[in-house]
Every structure is written in C-alpha cells, then in structure tokens.
Image: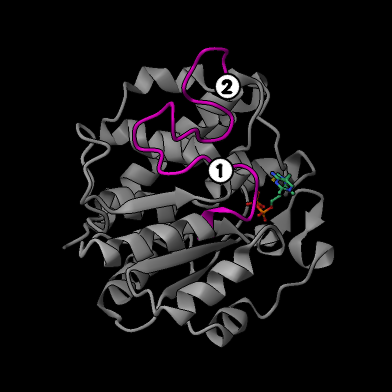
Amino acid sequence: MSANLDQLKVTAKIIRADILRSTTAAGSGHPSSSLSATEVVTALYFGGFMKHDAKNPRWPDRDRFILSKGHAAPVLYAALAESGYFPKADLLTLRKLGSPLEGHPNYKRLGGVEASTGSLGQGLSIGVGQALAARVDKKDFRVFVMTGDGELGEGQIWEAAATAGKYKLDNLVCIVDRNHFQQTGAAEDVLNMDPIDGKFAAFGWHTITINGNDMGEVVQAFQRAQEFKGQPTCIVSLTHKGQGILPLLEKLGDTNFHGKPLPEKYLEEALALVK
Ligand SMILES: Cc1ncc(C[n+]2csc(CCOP(=O)(O)OP(=O)(O)O)c2C)c(N)n1
C-alpha cells in the first residue's frame, strides 16, 4: 500500500469539517472527542490499511474497525460517508429521530458500523472475538479497535487485553486515543492508567507510541503494525482533544469541551480553522 500523505491530510480536513457541521446541526454530540481521532480514522479508511467495500458492508473478508469510544461517532460517520457508505447529506441527520446516525454507532442500523458501542469498555472484547473468529475461519482479515484513554478504566478492557496477548492475536490492533481528557477532567486525575504502553506490554502486546495528530507518524505506525507478527499491537496515539480548533476552545475557556457541540455562531470560525 502507498498512502499519499498530502491526500490523507486533505481528507482529514474534510472529515474535521463534517464532524463540526454534523454536531452543530444536531445540537449535541462529541466533536472534541472526534477531532482528536481524525488522523487515525482517516488513515485507516483512506490510507489503504483496511480492505473494505462501501457497496458491500458485510463482505465477510473485510477488515473491521470498531470505535469502542462510541461517543466519537461523528468521526466514524464522516469517514463512512466520505467512503460512500451513505450520502454525505445524511451526516446532517445525526442524532435526529429516525436517522440511523444515532448518537452512538448502531450495528443493526448502519452498514459499516462493526459493533454497537457507547457503553465504554466493551469494544476491545468484541475485537478480540472477531480476531479469534478470523483465525478459526482461516481468514486473513484484520481488526482495528479504538478506545479512549479514560475508557481504559471501564468495562472489560483488561480482560480483553490479556486474552489478546494469550492468543497472540497479531491480526488485532488497538489504538488508544490518548488525548489526556475524559468526561469530567484529566484522564489521569479520574483514574491514572499510566504507563499505558507498559500495561499493554505486560499483557503480551507489541506497543508503538506516536503523535496521533501527525499523519506521517500515524501512517508509519499502521505500516509497522501490519508487518509485525506474533503479538497484537497497541498504538498509543498521543493526541489533543479538539485538535484543529484548539484556539477556539481556548478562547471559549474549555479545552476538554466534552460532549458539547459548537454553537452555530462559532461554526464558521471553527471551519476556517480546520481548512
Ligand atoms: C460504561 C460507561 N461509563 C460511562 C460513560 C459516560 N462517558 C461517556 S464519554 C466518557 C469519557 C470517556 O473518556 P475517554 O475515553 O478519554 O474519551 P474522550 O472523549 O476523552 O476521547 C464517559 C465517562 C459511558 N459512555 N459508558
């Protein structure tokens, strides 16, 4: 695969703009949690790291991406729309009654969603199950899971991590979106999970730490994960919550900005920043 960095950076800008427009139109949602994850999700869908087919979302041999931090659904929806899973205009139906673009991804309602998430701490277990299924079925598909850093204190994350290590699931990649915040403040103040890479390594994972808002580093990490055999890979992706609109969030006096859409009056300013 040859990922064109310039093209990926352009796509990331489109994704960021879609995140902002869709959440402002909804009047709710989690733009800052989505913006931190944009480079990773963009590289996965458009960098050639996942085989997937928008015309055939349940193709059995596809690679899977599970957004375990399901509240960041707007970044997933923007990537799916840009890939052609559904019309881009539908992004503006986010969180509207009857829309399949629910506040959190719903596997049963939207092609391209691989697991219903939102209750934090479950997606890695689902990914482990899928990665094991690939082995049992003798298929070569790969599974990518993104968790939050706050999410590492939730659910059955560490049972899943231990299981993936035990079975040496080298078709599984977990990306931790290490944006240093969670819902109510700094992730490390709520429940300190440092060292994240050390914990995954202790469970038998290969770990890579990168600047997850640098497209070049993200692409390199996925290339290394693809080549690495014998262990699952955890990419600790150091990011900024709200990446792309940080000056605006600073002006608004809230660099976490958790679960808040931008009010309409700030939308143009935000769109100008992500251009
Ligand atoms: C099991 C569970 N507990 C609590 C919540 C409420 N909740 C939603 S988002 C969030 C913070 C998650 O923080 P993090 O994983 O760091 O993601 P970020 O939004 O900072 O990227 C919490 C606690 C939830 N969705 N699920």
Does label 2 or label 1 sit earlier along the sequence? 2
Quarter of the image holding residue 112? Answer: top left
| Helix, strand or loop at mark 1 | loop
Q: Is residue 207 visible?
A: no
The N terminus is located in which quarter? Answer: bottom left
Q: Is residue 79 left or right of residue 251?
A: left
Magenta segment: does it hold 110? yes
The residue at label 2 has a CB less than 8 Å from ligand 1: no
At horizontal 50% and vertical 52% (from top left) the residue drawn is 37
The C terminus is located in which quarter? Answer: top left
The span shown in magenta is 95-124
In the rendering, at what x and y percent does residue 196 appear? 62, 76
Quarter of the image holding residue 83? Answer: top left
User: Which mark is in front, 2 or 1?
Assistant: 1
Kindly give the residue lying farthest to the top in the view shown. Answer: 97
In the rendering, at what x and y percent does residue 109 appear? 43, 26
Q: Nearer the viewer, residue 76 or 214?
A: 76
Q: Amino acid at mark 1?
A: Thr
Give the vertical position of 243 relative to 150 (above or below): above
